[in-house]
Image (cartoon, rainbow, N blue to C red):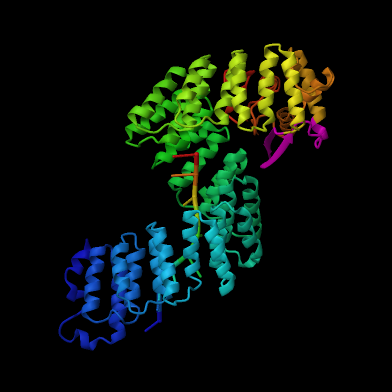
DNA sequence: CTAGGGTTAG
């Protein structure tokens, strides 16, 4: 390395002999020192410059010591131990020196040390300045210590740094990362638009993203564009993430285009986000295509592809890529195993599920999480191995959660095992579920077993708990880059009902009759039929049929699982209207085409 | 004549 060979000959850098020293003016020598410090690429080199600074008696002059500390504490190659030892020798450290040390500790994740240094600073009578607070707030962010953050916010007020734009950005970010979206927003709203920097937008958008407020995230992104600010990479990654969760494929594609037009190359994070968004918005082939031509892949990239294929029910491909990953020397972690096991799940591959569950524990020595157990319990239950599933639940090192009991209940419904279904339901309700769909599940079980008395008991219980007419289900559909939301019995789009009517006529010709036996409401048959026909998914499909071109695919995102009537209905619609309909429900994708569904009616 | 502040994926 050029740098180090030069440093082995100190006299070339700082003339310590002959006239060199006397001729150079003092300021020049100090500037030379600072210049050298900037050029250091290792602690070893820094030590040599340090030695020369001491030898020349420059330590106490013109920020030499400060520069030594900052170079050592903040560089990629830095060492906090060494930085501390230099820092100790500074007789009268100023706020800059303390700030540097605090930032160094944070960079090296010694967060307690950072706070300690801050206290030391106060103790020495050095006033914190507007550079101190962003650093401290960063420490709070890392520690998720919102209470301390609030305290610091108070001090910022007192000391009058509250109008500093960097301090404000740090506050927005800190509150956001600590999950206090409200406070985060308050700081953001208090800034004048003209003073908001790209960092302010970035912080608030990522705050919304980390809280899962995806629509808000996109709304702010839109506002930012209106102001005329150009989005940067990290914001676009958050936007993609929002698209993933909302199923906004068109917007994701625009964002992809924007990235290609405005950046010279896409890094791993951006590429991984793109793959994820395509996979989870029902465009698996494009996600796969991007994955294949990635130049650099990491654990995350494999993870999104595997879990993406899983929700599309493409288990064999997921297994293949999992194998490739291991061959590449990338270790699977617990999240990737959730992907692999859920691939087994969505395809009903019981043997493979057991195989991977063993591999996870015994080959890769990962502690199974409740999600892994959840996959296996679901797999067993749906294969009819309900007793075995219960044994597994009993053997778990952790308490079973609602997801597990719900899955078991649903398996009992499928296999008509009312006795164990009641057991599962009892456990589920002990976890204080106020989920109307859970009651519907158990009532469906009774209905299937023709136990009408129990059905009505459940109905009464629901009414007592105020769960009737709760409308939890919705369907989102994207038309011309906007997401439209439908809930059951939505009357806000009158056109849709005309369309539905027309669709029903066509469906009748195909031999469809609505399955009203599971509608739990205490209403007459006509009303039941009416309720069923206005399920949100049907409304969304009708809306899309009206407003999109005949050749385009219809994509729907749901927050709950599909009812079997909607499933049958959608299969038929895909034939009658010759449209591909892709529905993402809470669990997975259903790809309807020519009267069949990619899930093979197993879901 | 000094250095330093926000942010990106399962």
**Residue at x 36%, y 79% (from the top left corner):** A92
Q: Residue furthest left?
A: A18
The magenta segment: A472-496
Provide residue A8's location: percent of width, then percent of height. Answer: 17, 68
Can you see residue A590?
Answer: no
Who is closer to the viewer here, A564 or A33?
A: A564
**Residue at x 51%, y 27% (from the top left corner):** A374
Residue A586: say if magenta. Answer: no
Provide residue A273's location: percent of width, then percent of height. Answer: 50, 43
Provide residue A312's location: percent of width, then percent of height. Answer: 53, 27
Residue A489: say if magenta. Answer: yes
If the image is split into quadrants, where does the C terminus of chain A sit?
A: top right
- Horizontally, residue B5 falls left or right of residue A1, namely right
Who is closer to the viewer here, A192 or A240?
A: A192
Q: How many badges with numbers are in the image?
A: 0
If the image is split into quadrants, where does the N terminus of chain A sit?
A: bottom left
């Amino acid at each position: 390395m050029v740098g180090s060979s030069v440093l082995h000959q100190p006299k070339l850098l700082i003339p310590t002999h002959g006239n060199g020293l006397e001729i150079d003016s003092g300021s020049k020598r100090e500037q030379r020192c600072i210049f050298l410090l900037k050029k250091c690429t290792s602690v070893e080199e820094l030590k040599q410059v340090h030695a020369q600074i001491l030898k020349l008696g420059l330590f106490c002059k013109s920020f030499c010591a400060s520069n030594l500390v900052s170079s050592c504490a903040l560089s990629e190659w830095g060492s906090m131990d060494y930085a501390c030892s230099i820092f100790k020798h500074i007789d009268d450290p100023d706020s800059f020196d303390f700030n540097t040390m605090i930032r160094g500790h944070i960079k090296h994740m010694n967060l307690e040390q950072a706070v300690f240094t801050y206290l030391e600073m106060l103790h020495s009578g050095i006033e914190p300045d507007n550079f101190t607070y962003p650093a401290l707030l960063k420490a709070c962010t890392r520690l998720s210590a919102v209470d301390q953050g609030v305290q610091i916010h108070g001090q910022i007020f007192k000391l009058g740094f509250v109008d500093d734009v960097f301090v404000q950005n740090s506050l927005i970010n800190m509150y956001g990362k600590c999950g206090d979206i409200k406070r985060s927003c308050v700081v953001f709203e208090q800034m004048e638009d003209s003073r908001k920097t790209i960092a302010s937008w970035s912080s608030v958008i990522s705050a919304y993203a980390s809280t899962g407020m995806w629509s808000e995230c996109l709304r702010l992104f839109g506002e930012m564009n209106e102001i005329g600010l150009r989005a940067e990479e990290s914001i676009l990654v958050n936007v993609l993430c929002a698209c993933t969760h909302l199923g906004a494929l068109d917007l994701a594609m625009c964002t992809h285009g924007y990235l290609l037009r405005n950046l010279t190359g896409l890094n791993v994070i951006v590429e991984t986000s793109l793959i994820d968004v395509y996979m989870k918005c029902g465009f698996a082939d494009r996600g796969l295509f991007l994955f294949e031509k990635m130049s650099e892949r990491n654990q995350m990239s494999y993870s999104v592809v595997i879990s993406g294929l899983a929700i599309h029910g493409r288990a064999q491909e997921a297994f293949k890529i999992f194998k490739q990953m291991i061959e590449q020397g990338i270790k699977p972690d617990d999240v990737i195993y959730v992907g692999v096991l859920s691939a087994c799940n969505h395809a009903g591959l019981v043997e493979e599920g057991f195989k991977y569950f063993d591999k996870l524990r015994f080959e890769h020595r990962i502690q199974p999480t409740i999600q892994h157990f959840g996959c296996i319990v679901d797999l067993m239950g749906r294969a009819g191995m309900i007793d075995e599933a219960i044994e597994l639940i009993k053997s778990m090192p952790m308490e079973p959660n609602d997801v597990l009991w719900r899955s078991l209940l649903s398996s009992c419904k499928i296999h008509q095992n009312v006795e164990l279904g009641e057991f599962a339901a009892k456990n589920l309700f002990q976890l204080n579920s106020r989920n109307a769909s859970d009651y519907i599940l158990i009532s469906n079980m009774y209905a299937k077993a023709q136990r009408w008395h129990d059905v009505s008991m459940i109905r009464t219980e629901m009414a007592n708990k105020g769960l009737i007419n709760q409308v939890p289900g919705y369907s989102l559909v994207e038309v011309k880059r906007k997401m439209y939301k439908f809930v059951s019995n939505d009357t806000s789009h009158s056109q849709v009902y005309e369309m539905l009517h027309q669709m029903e006529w066509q469906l009748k010709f195909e031999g469809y009759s609505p399955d009203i036996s599971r509608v739990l409401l205490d209403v007459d048959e006509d009303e039941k039929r009416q309720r069923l026909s206005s399920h949100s998914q049907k409304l969304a499909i009708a809306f899309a049929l009206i407003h999109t071109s005949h050749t385009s695919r219809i994509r729907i995102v749901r927050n709950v699982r599909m009812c079997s009537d909607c499933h049958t209905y959608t299969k038929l619609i895909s034939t009658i209207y010759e449209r591909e309909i892709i529905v993402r429900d809470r669990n997975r994708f259903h790809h309807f085409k020519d009267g069949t569904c990619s899930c093979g009616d197993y879901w």
